[in-house]
């Protein structure tokens, strides 16, 4: 954990480690590798830990917290994570974990931080898990309908017919009515 120059002993700086005696270089034995951290005076790299809310890039003197709306990446086997990435559209990220937006909802923005994502799918459309727009998939033909927040089209029951509340003669039906 030390190196010596000109008769003086110095502690290996944070982000480096000194694994042997008689070191004379300020880099000591080397830079702390990705997935590990090395506090000042380290004799060996310390695993960052298996927690997804922390990461350790190369040269870390301590574990870094994964930022809100980001997730941990580049897992180093037996050590931890080496980097973080911004949560992509269609997903939300909490405590360094990336999860897919639930069916019936959509995530149009990067960096989403809750399971509500950007909102619910529009009536007349459905949104499978991971959707990135409120009109991800058109509902379909006259035998199905899609109210707001649909995860898939619903089949029209016998004795009922589809209707659109948009008055635009679209084929994206969002309601059904009993035949009278």
Image (spheres, rainbow, N blue to C red):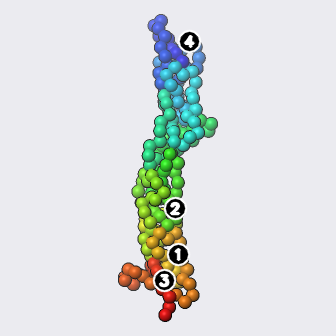
**Residue 31 seen in this snapshot:** no
- In terms of secondary structure, where does tag 1 sit? loop
- In terms of secondary structure, where does tag 3 sit? strand
Q: Position of residue 60 (x, y in %)?
A: 49, 31
Q: Dot 1, how many residues are within 10 Å of its Cα: few (below 14), some (14-19), or many (20+)?
A: many
Q: Position of residue 87 (x, y in %)?
A: 46, 51
Q: CA distance from mark 3 to mark 4?
A: 82 Å
Which residue bears the numbered disc 3? 176
**Residue 156 seen in this snapshot:** yes
Query: Which quarter of the picture shows residue 159?
Result: bottom right
The label shown at residue 102 is: 2
154 or 14: nearer the eye?
Answer: 154
**Which comes sooner in the sequence, label 1 or label 3?**
1
At horizontal 49% and vertical 40% (from top left) the residue drawn is 83
65 or 13: nearer the eye?
Answer: 65
Q: Position of residue 30 (x, y in %)?
A: 52, 24
The label shown at residue 22 is: 4
**Which comes sooner in the sequence, label 3 or label 4?**
4
Q: CA distance from mark 1 to mark 2?
A: 16 Å
Q: Are marks 1 and 4 in contact (CB under 8 Å)?
A: no
């Amino acid at each position: 954990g030390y190196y010596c120059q000109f008769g003086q002993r110095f502690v290996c700086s944070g982000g480096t480690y000194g694994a042997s005696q008689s070191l004379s270089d300020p880099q000591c034995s080397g830079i702390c590798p990705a997935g590990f951290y090395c506090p000042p005076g380290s004799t060996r790299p310390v695993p960052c830990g298996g927690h997804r809310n922390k990461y350790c890039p190369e040269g870390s003197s301590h574990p870094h917290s994964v930022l809100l709306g980001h997730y941990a990446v580049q897992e180093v086997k037996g050590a931890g994570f080496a980097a973080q990435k911004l949560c992509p559209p269609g997903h939300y990220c909490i405590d360094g974990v990336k999860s897919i937006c639930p069916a019936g909802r959509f995530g149009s923005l990067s960096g989403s931080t809750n399971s509500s994502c950007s909102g619910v799918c529009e009536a007349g459309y459905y949104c499978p898990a991971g959707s990135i727009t409120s009109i991800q998939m058109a509902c379909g033909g006259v035998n199905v309908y899609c109210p707001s927040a649909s995860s898939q089209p619903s089949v029209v029951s016998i004795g009922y017919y589809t209707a659109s509340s948009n008055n635009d003669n679209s084929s994206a039906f969002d309601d059904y009515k009993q035949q009278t």
